[in-house]
Image (cartoon, rainbow, N blue to C red):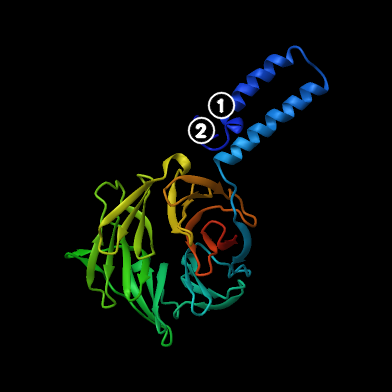
Amino acid sequence: MTCAYCATGPINMCKMTFEQNKWSVRNQMNTISGPKIVSLLLLLSLLAGYHAKRVHAASPWVWDRVLKQDLVNDAMMMPTSLYIDGDKGLYYVVDSGRNRLLSFNRKGELLNIFNAGKALDIPFDMVKTTPKGVWIVEKGRNSLSYIDLKEKKVTPNSLMYNGELVYPDRIEADGDILYVLNKATGNIISYSEQLEALTRFSCSECAWGVVDFKIHDRKLWALDQAGKTIRCFNLDGKLIKTFKLGKSVVFPVSLAIGPTGYMYVLDRQRRSVAAYDRSGIFKYRFLKKGITRGQLYYPIEIRFDPWGELCLVDEGNAKVEIFKR
């Protein structure tokens, strides 16, 4: 029989029953002593622990490996984003502090350091739509730049929407369509490869606009930081549904949608990840502040790789942590 009080499990294990048992035990402790008291206290502890597990599931994620470059005088400095090339099995880390890109294989081994002839100016995010080159958001010159990898040539581009200058921030790609977050307005705009503006994804209810987004399952998932809300759009720009994050996060900065449809939100202030099911119900939180393996200091981005692993870009610890189930 399910408990009507908490609806999480059998009535003999619910919170109400636990509270009733607690008071019953306290009353009985006035008349008993010794080993019986110890046994009753252990029972109360087990009941409390059981109910806590019923309310919040444990995290299934375990640390697996790290992407970092820590050579003396050449350490990674302020990584801001991660791009994964699933076809080649490569990870690309944007090292904003040193104006370069670093590539790693799936084992986490550093393969190459690329700075385009020292031509990059505060790179922030990147995507790859063709084998020949990559698109880079450069904060230093407010540009969505194209890099020809063979020629190591950087071509800056100023983005426009309805005659107004766009300030690119986060970027995603779906096929040959580019999706760009405009930092000035908090809106997301899609562009062709010729950088012709196509569709705007806007949120009139978002006080600060969107701070991060991902393309998943032919939908655009956007994070409203001030409203602590995830907003889901179809790729025509129509809002489909919203998910309230509640008090489970304090300062959300990035989101990712897992293979099972769970939503994961990176909380920069708590240095943790909050997990929600497909209905937007909070399930569990994991990770904490620290500078050692499996801990976060100033995390900035979360995303899944094509192999179902959870990747966290930690700006403060200058590395990318990868977790698996």
Residue at x-position 63% and y-position 19%:
23
Under circle 1, the secondary element is helix
Residue that mark 2 sits on: 6
> What quarter of the picture does the C terminus occupy?
bottom right
Q: Residues within 10 Å of mark 1 (few under 14, many from 20)?
A: some
Q: Quadrant of residue 14?
A: top right
Residue 242 visible in this rendered orientation of the protein: yes
- What residue appears at the point 35 percent right and 71 percent down from the top-left corner? 174
Tell me whether circle 2 and circle 1 mark residues in contact (CB < 8 Å).
Answer: yes
Badge 2 density bin: few <14, some 14–19, many ≥20, Cα 10 Å: some
Helix, strand or loop at label 2? It is: loop
Nearest the viewer among 112 and 7 is: 7
- For the residue pair 245 and 133, the one nearer the viewer reads as 245
Q: Which mark is residue 274?
A: none
Q: Amino acid at mark 1?
A: Met
As drawn, which residue projects farthest toward the left?
Answer: 163
Q: Nearer the viewer, residue 242 or 210?
A: 242
Residue 129 horizontal side relative to residue 324, left or right:
left
Name the residue: 58% across, 63% down.
Answer: 322
The N terminus - image quarter: top right
Q: Which residue is mark 1?
A: 16
Q: Is residue 88 above or below residue 304?
A: below
Q: What percent of the width, then of the height, locates residue 211? A: 37, 55
Q: Position of residue 251 (x, y in %)?
A: 44, 46
Q: Quadrant of residue 73?
A: bottom right
